[in-house]
Amino acid sequence: MYIQEAVVKNQVGLHARPATFFIQKANEFKSSIWVEKDERRVNAKSLLGVLSLGIVKGTAIHIIADGPDEVGAVGALAELISSDFSE
């Protein structure tokens, strides 16, 4: 299991379009991936799950992965969040 904290920099947080990009990236990996905010954990590959966290700009989240490509998955998702979704 691999965990990394990331701070959401996107102006609208992790809502609608940014959440969709995040989930698409998460689905590129074989590992199980979760997003955790305030001790509530959801599947990072689920749009409704991610949206239900209500992640706004400046929120610190944990990205957690478990599986064969866990380090790469967490790294890619953390990089996406810190890039302000401007790939």
Image (cartoon, rainbow, N blue to C red):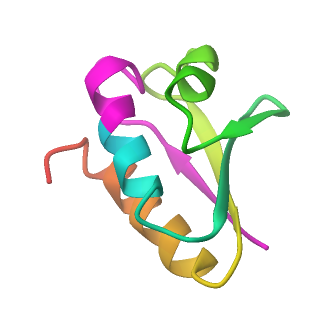
Residue 59 figure quarter = top right
Q: Is residue 6 left or right of residue 43?
A: left
> Residue shown at 50%/28% (left/top)?
47
Number of numbered callouts drawn: 0
Q: Residue 30: image x %, image y %?
A: 56, 71
- Between 12 and 23, which is closer to the camera in this rendering? 23
- Between 71 and 29, which is closer to the camera in this rendering? 29
Any magenta on residue 19?
yes
Residue 17 figure quarter = top left
Relative to 11, say whether 82 is above or below: below
> Residue shown at 49%/68% (left/top)?
29
Q: Quadrant of the C terminus?
A: bottom left
Q: Residue 72: image x %, image y %?
A: 49, 78
Q: Residue 66: image x %, image y %?
A: 74, 70
Any magenta on residue 10?
yes
Relative to 3, say whether 11 is above or below: above
Give the residue furthest to the left. 86
Relative to 6, say whether 31 is above or below: below
Q: Which segment is the magenta one?
A: 1-20
